[in-house]
Image (tube, helix red, strand yellow):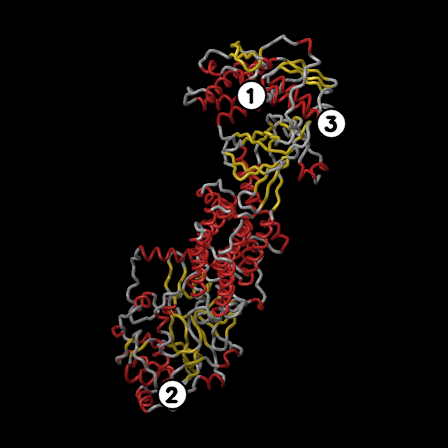
Amino acid sequence: MAASMLNRRSLYFLLVSMALITLPHAWHMPWPLFSFFAAMWVWRFLAVRRGDWLPKRWLLFLLTLLGIVLLITQQRGVFGRDAGTGLFVVALGLKLMEIHGRRDVFLVVYLAFIVAASQFLYEQSILMAGYILLVCTVLLATLITQNTAQVATQAAIKTAAAIILQALPMAAVIFVLFPRLEAPRWMWLADDNKALSGLSNTLEPGSISDLSLSDELVFRVRFDGEAPPPAQRYWRGPVYSRTDGVRWTMAANHNQPTPAVDFSGKAYRYTLLMEPQKQNWVFGLDMPESFDASLRLNRAFQLLSDKRPADRAEYKIVSRPGYDTGPINPADYRDNLQLPAAASAKQLALIKTLQGFDGPPERFIQNLLNHFSRERFYYTLTPPLMPDNPIDTFLFETRSGFCSHYATAFVYLLRIAKIPARVVGGYQGGEFNRVGGFLEVRQADAHAWAEAWLENKGWVRFDPTAAIAPERVERGVNVDLQIASGAVNFGPVIADSAALSWLKRSRQLWQSIDYNWQRWVINYNGANQMRFLQALGIDGIAALAKWLVGSLLVVTLPLVWWLLKKNRKPADKTLSLYRRFCDKLAKAGVAIGQGEGPKDFADRAQKQRPELAARIQQITALFIRLRYQADAADGDLQKLKALVDTFSVKKVKQD
Amino acid sequence: MNAQPLGLKQRFKLSRFVSGEAPASGPIVLNQRRVFILPTRRGMVFVALIALVVLIAFVYNNNLAYMLGFLMASIFFVTILHSFKSLSGLVIRPAQHPPVFAGDKAMFNFVLHNPGDQQRVAIEMRLQEAVPISLQAGETRSVSLPAATKKRGWLDCSTLTLSSCYPLGLFRVWSPLRFDSRVLVYPYPAKLDLPFPETAAGQGRQGQSKRGGDEFYGLKSYQSGDPIRQIHWKAYAKGRGLHSKQYAGSASLEFWLDYDETPGGDVEGRLSQLCRWVVDAERAGLRYGLLLPGAKLSPDCGIAHSQACLRELALFGLAR
């Protein structure tokens, strides 16, 4: 374990790979922890040339204390992703200070592999996978350089890359066939501080405005067959029934059994790939008819998942656009007529003019929608603040807002008119990815609409935002996208940009690759694996084991052959040809002796096999010229090859 | 080379792992029968590391972490091949092993040949001390492995081990090889600088040649057996052929080194003294003969003669 065993280059290699492996953590680690590591790293880097700069034992002790204090103050808890990552990174920083021998290099490199694994707990994109692959190459190169000082830096990296490339096919086979089991629930380590955005439990007009600006992907949908027209693409999410006039929340009794639904219309079959979420909400197309066993439909017809929301998950769902939810039960009726206070005079007057109290509900609803369209209501993503009495402020003063304002005001008025109504949150539209053939739904597509319960029809969807006249839509921040994707239908659809620019096309190509990556790699879980393996005809552990062994052999045997073949092949072509010639003679009983020169051997062989004399002489002469004389001609090697190839010796009977 | 096939029983004999197969005299090719491979302690820790990464993947249900774990497992496997590759195919044959005096380091010389088109690095050859070696593609190089000598006679080459942890240090490949090479160990030359003995046994032969000594006498054409130090190199360099310088002087007497007349307590002591005299006489360019019980070498000089004398001394009383 002498320090002399460590060459300086190996140390630099080690430091570079440490920097690469921890760098991505800079974005999601508390900055004091990362700064601690960075300081240790810089210190160690400077000390490569100046060994006396390394901390003495007492200082190292203090540094360790500092690290522990930082860990305790910056992290809550000992277990879990964030705590574990912090611990490993701080340990790595401290260990850097204490590299004395090869053993320490190994330890640090091994720690780095764990840090690499923890990287995937934060991000699983293709780019991250590629990055980690690169880091692994540097880590292996570090091991190679510390093994020997004789290898050039480039050669070390090349060897490391070769090892990784050769290992990849095998890793892929294991990846596909290694049985995936769901970890038991007690092992789920909660990390509440993950910054995931999405629709929230409550709706306060204004809370969605942030979402409208975010380009973040929420889920992707691949339809088996035709996709529904944009106007029907309502992805149903949380349903807000209770309100205090300002804030809307979900009703408490949503987990009761779902009422029976009478479906009609075309059935759309699709696969939904959810990105990591905060909630276990799954946004099914309005209205889901049948779905995976891991999903359930709550009383408000919202899909909920049993899976961990922080993981990507794939669901198969069938939805139909036509539905009749039947009669309303008393609890729902009560919930969906609930109002925080008595209606104001202005509200009553408005409803009265719109025939809310003396006609069929359908007519009132139509009148109300027309009211939004006729009067000077504006659509804006930056509405004025309405802290008190937002419904009245919106309806009678500001008259500008976005989907949540319209939906809440609409529902509020309906309830005053004794029509059960509620606000539905979710997403509308989505951008069709032509390359991948799937629909991408982003946070910008977040939407809120209304539902009213009508006699003999059940819950019916109304979208008051869509009623606004197109000229009053503020051409604001991100509306282009919403219009293009059909998120908001402001009258005639403004032309879907027909000519996709190359930028858009490449973006879609990338999205498509990413989709397939998510779908086939990230989301390859137990259920998907079972489906995939069954398609291959693998059912049961025995068959799986056979397949695993079989495919590993298929992958490794060519590798073994290829790797070991290189060893046998002599560097010299002339020599290898000559050896083949000798082998042929040896088979016929004329073996070249130890230390026998080609000339002597030729003489002996000619005596033993006079019928081959001419050929032996020719080959030997050519060989000698090629190997020992400077005047070999260009074609000589080919000539020798031809001669050796056609050289054949018949065995002579020994009697 | 590796001709005879192994029986099943021999194949699984444990001693093959440490001491190799029966000694060989010719070249040995390192093939799968000769090369052994086992994970190092670091390799074992690496396996534990793989398990840990897969456990993390399992707990977090993270497919890329799984992939990393599987990749590491595959790297582990591929490294077996690379490790094997770092030794397999090498050809090693014994070369000349020059005799030494007891107490000096014996040098076992081997010629190592890398027939493949790949560089081999970080190979360690060990007889008693480790010698690091690297070989270019197609390179042939000779390697001297030191071994301590204690007593005169034949020193057999013990098991020679080639090993390597290249490339990642997760595995150690090694190949124990035994050659029937041996080094002749001359007796330890006595420290005491005693004068040459009075020649008693060879009196009758005095005066045959007065040449040899410290005064330059003339040149004669070289005859094999003439001491190398007396060759007139300058003349040779000028292209005039090999000539030996002739010396004449008082010390040019020839004499006998007689075992029975040699002081020194036991057999080894006497041999040691005789050895010293042979070396000194040869260095001085004298003519000397050796008389041992059962062996007699007539007075002469030159390297061949001194080596013959030393050989007699080394093997005196031992099985040849």
Amino acid at pointer 1: Ser
Is B169 located above or below residue A247 in the figure? above
Drawn side of residue A641 relative to residue A228, left or right: right
**Circle 2 Cα neighbour tier, 10 Å, few/some/many (<14 / 14–19 / ≥20):** many
Q: Both on one chain, marks 2 and 1? A: yes
Q: Both on one chain, marks 2 and 3? A: no
Question: The C terminus of chain A lies in which quarter of the figure?
Answer: top right
Question: Is residue A315 visible from the viewing direction of this image?
Answer: no
Residue A391, located in which quarter of the rendered image? bottom left
Residue bearing mark 1: A648
Drawn side of residue A419 relative to residue B174, left or right: left
Residue bearing mark 3: B265
Relative image position of residue B311 (x, y in whole percent): 66, 22
Q: Nearer the viewer, mark 2 or mark 3?
A: 3
Residue A540, located in which quarter of the rendered image? bottom right
Drawn side of residue A625 relative to residue A364, left or right: right
Is A316 located above or below residue A566 in the figure? below
Amino acid at pointer 3: Gly
**Image marks 3 and 1: residues in contact by CB distance under 8 Å:** no
Residue bearing mark 2: A416
**Circle 1 Cα neighbour tier, 10 Å, few/some/many (<14 / 14–19 / ≥20):** some
Amino acid at pointer 2: Ile
Q: Disc 1: which chain?
A: A
Is A294 located above or below residue B238 in the figure? below
